[in-house]
Every structure is written in C-alpha cells, then in structure tokens.
Amino acid sequence: MGGPSAEREVSLRSGAAVSAGLRRAGWRVCDVDVRGPDFVLEPDTAVAFLALHGTFGEDGTLQRLLEERGVAYTGCGVQASHDCFDKAISKRIFEAAGVPSARYEVLAASGPRRVTLPLPVVVKAACQGSSVGVAIVRDAGALDAALADAFRYGEQAVVEEFIAGREFTVGILGETPLPVVEVRPKTGVYDYASKYTKGATEYEVPARLLEATTREMQEVALKAFRAAGCRDYSRVDFLLSQGDERPCVLEINTLPGMTETSLLPKAAAAAGIGFEELCSRMVTMALERRVRNV
C-alpha cells in the first residue's frame, strides 16, 4: 500500500480497507507501506496484494520488481499494467482491437504543441491516474496551460475529443463483467475532488440502462480487458454519448480503488460478492498462478 506517487493517500486508504477485509476473511496479513523499490516483505510471503495506485504501483514497475523477487502478486502482469497506465499506448491498443474510444492525438513535450481536433477537447497526462493532469479545454486560450500542466507529469500528453454524455464503469472479475455502475458527479465533471470528496458524487448500481445497452457495455469492457492482456480483475471506464448512446471506453484501471465504497467493490456487491469475498478471490487467483508458476 502507499507508494511514492501522487495517489499515495488514496492508495493507503485502499490498502487499509483490503487489509481489514482479508483479516476478517481469515487470512494472515502483513501491511507494507511501500515508499520505493527497497520495500521489505516477510520471508514467507505467499502473495503480495497490490493496493498502490498511480506511478510505480500501477505502471508495471512494482510488478516487475516482484517478479524479479519471485513473489506472486494480485492483478495484471508487467506488460498489461504498463500498457494500460500509459494512455497513449492503451489508445493504440483499443484502436487496433476495434474497441470504441474517442478520437485522439498524442503530443510530446519536446515537439510542437499543435492540436488539430476541434474544441472542446480533453487534455490528459499520458501516465497518471485519478484525473491527475486532466483538463477539459473549451477555449483556445486555455489550451497552452492545460498542456503545460499535463507535461508536468511526463513527456507525453493525450488530447481527446470531448464527448458529452453519462459516465459509467464496468468491473471485470476473472473473465466476468460485473454490473454496470453509473457515476454522477454533482459538479458535472468526475475530477479528483469528485472522486475522493465524500458526497461529491452519486453512484447507481446496477445502472438504469436498456438491457441491450448494458450487455453491449459489458461486452466492450471484456473486449478491452482481453485486448490489453489483462488478468484477474480491472475496471473499464466509459462514456455513453448523448443522442446515439454509443459506449466509448475512456481507460482501463488495472489496480482500481479498493475501499469498501470504491466502484469495483460496489459492482461486486451488486453481483452478490461481499468485500471480504472479493479480496479473497483476488488473492486466490494469484495463489493459483503461483502454483502453476505463471
């Protein structure tokens, strides 16, 4: 839990919730506050449960370190973690696999800052989570500042067409899509404050959608999950565009929030899977991989 990223505090909350849930389920747990690559695990560690969000924990770095130590861990492997965390790479994966996603451009900090997509656009730091380094730009005069902020977090920025619509998320557990969750930020924008301020966002699960739309969103989520090489669990975030109600994948979160009120646990609960069982299933999948040595 923890980690050195901009999402450290959120990661500590996820880690504390998972630790408590696993203890209630009867697992022996040792909490490890990771601050960098020199973290220490107990010698008899069977599985490392990853509850770190953002850089280092979610981008494949921690996964690679654990594989080098021969330690089994929960969630996606090194490559899928890296690719899903990098929005420029994941957009190309979606494009190649036919997964619906917004039109986009990738800009480099060292290159020309010329955007050809019509305004409004969404500017995103390529390698951040929790809406860090994200801005909706409606006025051309605000574009340079949005790009400068995105480049504070890395060498690339992704600029997407702005799609007006409702926001949803689909959790995947194993190879099974969970019930769809609708996300309703009271400000109209699901930014960092809306995600982590109590009462700032309303959630509905299962989301009130036509059965065909629910099924389509779940099928698209599973397609994206597989195309990116994910395993065990992830959360696929969507926009449902106004008018044609076309599902559009925003991103895949390979280590989604894991407090008892986070989106993936909410979806699991709607499927009849309690928090302790959810955490236990994640550990069990990693243990089974350890036995198979994969």
Image: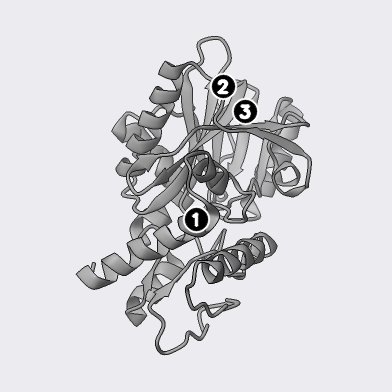
Question: Circle 1 — which element?
Answer: loop
Taking the image as drawn, is residue 111 in sight? no
Number of the label disc, if any, that sits on residue 208:
2
Mark pair 3, 2: CA separation? 28 Å
Mark 2–mark 1 Cα distance, whole angstroms, equals 26 Å
Indicate left or right for 185 with 204 as reference.
right
- Callout 3: SS: strand
| Residue in the foreground of this view, choosing between 217 and 270 | 270
Element at label 2 = loop
Q: Where 125 falls versus 290 (above or below)? A: above
Kindly report which numbered mark, 2 or 1, lies closer to the viewer in this rendering.
2
Density class for disc 2 (Cα within 10 Å; few <14, some 14-19, many ≥20) is: few
Mark 2 / mark 1, whichever is N-terminal:
2
Q: CA distance from mark 1 to mark 3?
A: 27 Å
Q: The disc labelled 3 sits on which kind of residue?
A: Val
Discs 3, 2 touching: Cβ within 8 Å: no
**Residue type at tag 1:** Leu
The residue positioned farthest toward the bottom in the image shown: 43
Q: Please state, as top left, top right, bottom left or bottom right, where the C terminus lies in the image.
A: bottom left
Q: In the image, what residue occupies the spot 34% across and 61% down? A: 285
Residue 93, horizontal then vertical, whole percent: 35, 40
Q: Is residue 259 visible?
A: yes
Disc 1: which residue: 255
**Residue for point 47% across, 18% down:** 246
How many C-alpha atoms fall within 10 Å of the one at disc 3: few (<14), some, or many (≥20)?
Answer: many
The number of discs equals: 3
Q: Could you tell me residue 250's position as x and y percent?
A: 51, 35
Q: Is label 3 or label 2 in front?
A: 2
Q: Which residue is mark 3?
A: 121
